[in-house]
Image (cartoon, rainbow, N blue to C red):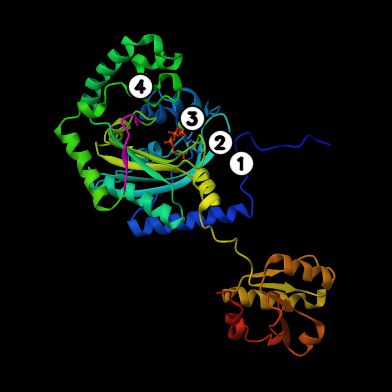
Amino acid sequence: MPEKIQAVKGMNDILPPDSARWEWFEDTVRALMRRYGYLNIRVPIVEPTPLFVRSLGEVTDIVEKEMYSWTDAMNGDELTLRPEGTAGVVRAAAEHSMLYDGGKRLYYMGAMFRHERPQRGRYRQFHQVGVEALGHAGPDVDAEVVLMCRSLWRDLGLSDVRLELNCLGQPAERRAHRDALVAHFEAHRELLDAEAQRRLHSNPLRILDTKNPAMQALVEAAPRLMDYLGDESLRHFQGLCGALDAAGQAYRVNHRLVRGMDYYSLTVFEWITDRLGAQGTVCGGGRYDGLMELVGGKPAPGIGWGLGIERVLDLVQQSGHAPPPPVPDVYAVVPDAAALPVAVQVSEALRAAGVAVLMHAGAGSMKAQFKRADASGARWALVFGGSELAQGVVAVKPLRDDAAPQVTRPLADVAAWAAELLHR
Ligand code: ATP
Ligand code: MG
């Protein structure tokens, strides 16, 4: 026997009935986007590698070690499976001059790929929903995108997701802070771990989000970016905080929140939970006013977030209110081959009238068919028995309500009685 082929490690199949939770989640997201006026954008899963190197920055976890990149054997192009959604959306916006007539509010859903060590909440193929509000300088839109997440948690029945915020200021402010930061870390060089040593001059800001317990005290004592911000950045941050206060949204200002990507400016935020163990960040986002220009477009501000669907659905499973998987309204029992043409015809007419009909496939005894009907969860069995068909009717047998009587309904004019089968 040939060896069994298995899925790639860290890349999961999503099977029924779990897939029903995914569909419910996606429907919930689409309804949310409609309420906030965000339009769907779909960009390729493969992009030129330089897009991510340029936009994420060379000294980031993603670009340093997590990307699935290869050289196209046909033409030598350097290509990468997208590790995140923002770069592709901003590339598309620039490529198609999408902002020529004003700002755009966009959202996407789809698979992302990162070569990480698989564990709970961390996979090699995972899925994100993200929004990007392009062409709006904020802070009004900053508050809008943050509050959209709150609405989503509510729609999903989630509590226990909290908000952390920071302001990364503008490049010049970050440079001044960076010098102070490097001086601070250099003065305590012996306390830096290998990764921090390596990042000391390439990306010292990232040292702030180290998870190494031995470095926590050092990092807590580091100079705060907030203290290097000018009036304009502070006003922007206060504008966001004021809007969140007015909306009754609590938050914690986390001075060490810097996020993984280089492209952020001003607002950065994360939604965090304690219910998922080590992988507690369910959603991260921020403002990236320099990104459009970086990928070759006309300069334009932007802000967005990306949310890990697996992590959110893990939370939903623990504490949310996902509806049960859908069941058919009707199971069609077909006692013999002679009944098949009528059964097909009636089933099609019912489906056209909006009734969910699961038709028995593959013949079999009545007993076996009723067993299937029962297992399907359907409320009714339609039984296309020979004597009923001879009288021009079909038997409608309730499967979930023992007290309800079995009735017959005419084969003609199905639409007239289809409505009574609908599960409401
Ligand atoms: P982490 O610190 O957990 O690695 P990140 O900063 O790399 O997260 P982002 O790039 O901001 O994550 O992606 C946004 C969201 O996507 C995360 O908050 C998380 O919910 C989800 N996510 C990121 N990487 C993975 C992964 N490998 N598997 C599953 N979900 C992920
Ligand atoms: Mg990561």
For label 4, the crowd category at 10 Å Cα-Cα, with few meaning under 14, some 14 to 19 and many 20 or more, is some
Please tell me whether mark 4 sits on a helix, a strand or a loop.
helix
Amino acid marked by disc 3: Leu
Extent of the magenta region: 250-258
Q: How busy is the neighbourhood of tag 2: few (under 14 within 10 Å), some, or many (20 plus)?
A: many
Instruction: Identify the residue under disc 3.
Output: 79
Cα separation between marks 1 and 3: 23 Å
- Give the residue type that dot 2 points to: Tyr
Kindly tell me whether mark 2's CB lies below 8 Å from ligand 1. Answer: yes
Amino acid at the residue labelled 4: Val
Q: Is residue 360 visible?
A: no
Q: Which residue is mark 1?
A: 12
* Pair 3/4: label in front: 4
Residue 96's image quarter?
top left
Question: Given this view, does label 3 or label 2 mark the residue nearer the observer?
Answer: 2
Label the magenta part by its dominant secondary structure. Answer: loop
Name the residue located 32 percent from the left edge and 10 percent from the top edge.
186
Specify which label sits upstream in the sequence, 1 or 3. Answer: 1
Which numbered disc flags the more N-terminal residue, 4 or 2? 2
Image quarter where the C terminus lies is bottom right
| SS class, disc 3 | strand
| Residue 155 shown left or right of residue 322 in the figure | left
- Residue name at image x 56 percent, y 54 percent: 21
Instruction: Report the side of 120 relative to 407 (left or right).
Output: left
Neighbour tally class for label 1: few under 14, some 14-19, many 20 plus, Cα within 10 Å: few
User: Would residue 257 be counted in the magenta stretch?
Assistant: yes
Tag shown at residue 181: none
The amino acid type of the residue labelled 1 equals Asn
State which quadrant residue 386 falls in.
Answer: bottom right
Q: Position of residue 296 (x, y in %)?
A: 30, 32
Q: Give yes or no for residue 194 being in the magenta stretch.
A: no
